[in-house]
Amino acid sequence: MKRGMMFVLGAVLLAGLALLFGRPFIAEQAFRRALDTNVGVDQSAAFADGLHLYVCGSGSPMPDADRAGPCLAVLAGNQAFIFDSGSGSIRKLGRMGFPMGKLRGEFLTHLHSDHIDGLGESLLQAWIAGGRSSPLPVYGPEGTDKVVAAFNAAYQIDSTYRVAHHGPKVANPTGFGGAAQIIALPDGADSQVVYDQEGVKITAIRVIHDPVKPAFGYRIDYKGRSIAISGDTVYAPAFVAASKGVDLMLHDALNKDMVAALGAKLAERGQPRTAQIMHDIQGYHASPEDAARAGKDAGAGTLVLYHLVPPVPARLIEPLFLGQAPKVFPGTLKLAQDGMIVHLPAGSKAVEFASGL
Ligand SMILES: [Zn+2]
Ligand SMILES: [Zn+2]
């Protein structure tokens, strides 16, 4: 039977049931179904061994109804990692069935507020949902120790309530908060392996986001598959060099013409400070064309643009945002959407896109 016909019959049946039993019956059925399919289910258990990328935040500091602040997460075999925690992103991870119990660490690309403003929620979920008995390692540039200590202090009172309410078997006091791990690249070095355990290798790469220094991108390697994450940067030769041959590159992207138009409108409406910000931010992010060039020069198989500035609220606007980028990058090029999961199964060249929301 055709899907359309099935849908119509299903709708008629539901309407009939609603007439017979009223709305509470339908609501009860829908609720029971959601319980069965979602609650407590580790969606990742069905994934093949390999690398899996979760887009938990494809947005930027700008208000965006559909996109959380910058956040990417990676599942590599049995180990999980989060790269930046923009606001709202941890809730997306929860909806995507991210295996918080497998979380081994969080990696910060830099300390701009939009990349850390969800870190408190992230640490809380790692502790409670992840059942941790030791603080979560948080890797990042110099200053990460201050940021982590401040989040620990901000959540300390809340932690005592949770221990008192649920008991130490649920909220083990020794697992609360984060433990900073400072990444300091040696002078003259542009990259360094900062995590190497059970077949998962993570390399920190110096990128260009002045005046934010240092700022890092990361490369993740596992069983012959690889992902590179740019963080915030302009076209950075060191990032391109360290990303050679990756299967999947995530790169930030800012459309300068669109941001300039936003700035002009803000100035026209008497908002000179925000207009100035629209001018300043154009100098430290990659344009979609720059990102496409980075992906092409690195020989990346697939390129996904994230940290989208300005917001791209509808598919209709995507071609305007992308500009010439599709002509520059020869492989598959997509804009990131919150909820997107990209599977890179071990022992294959496949790059499979799925939706986790
Ligand atoms: Zn930044
Ligand atoms: Zn940013």
Image (tube, helix red, strand yellow):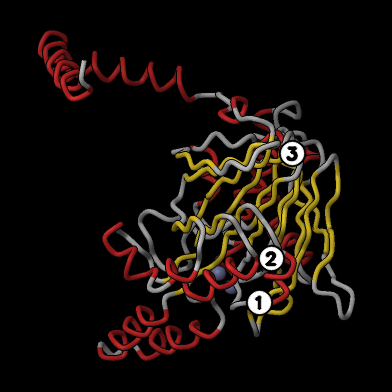
Q: Amino acid at mark 1?
A: Ala
Quadrant assignment, res 262: bottom left
Ligand 2 is in which quadrant of the figure? Answer: bottom right
Q: Which callout, 1 or 3, points at the residue further toward the start of the chain?
A: 3
**Residue 311 screen position, x and y as percent:** 38, 66
Residue at 62% over, 48% down = 73
Tag of residue 236: 1
Circle 3 is placed at which residue position? 79
Q: Amino acid at mark 3?
A: Gln
Q: Which callout, 1 or 2, points at the residue further toward the start of the chain?
A: 2
Is residue 265 positioned above or below 101 on the image? Answer: below
Q: Which callout, 3 or 2, points at the residue further toward the start of the chain?
A: 3
Q: Are marks 1 and 2 in contact (CB under 8 Å)?
A: yes
**Residue 94 screen position, x and y as percent:** 53, 38
Q: Amino acid at mark 2?
A: Gly
**Residue 15 screen position, x and y as percent:** 12, 17
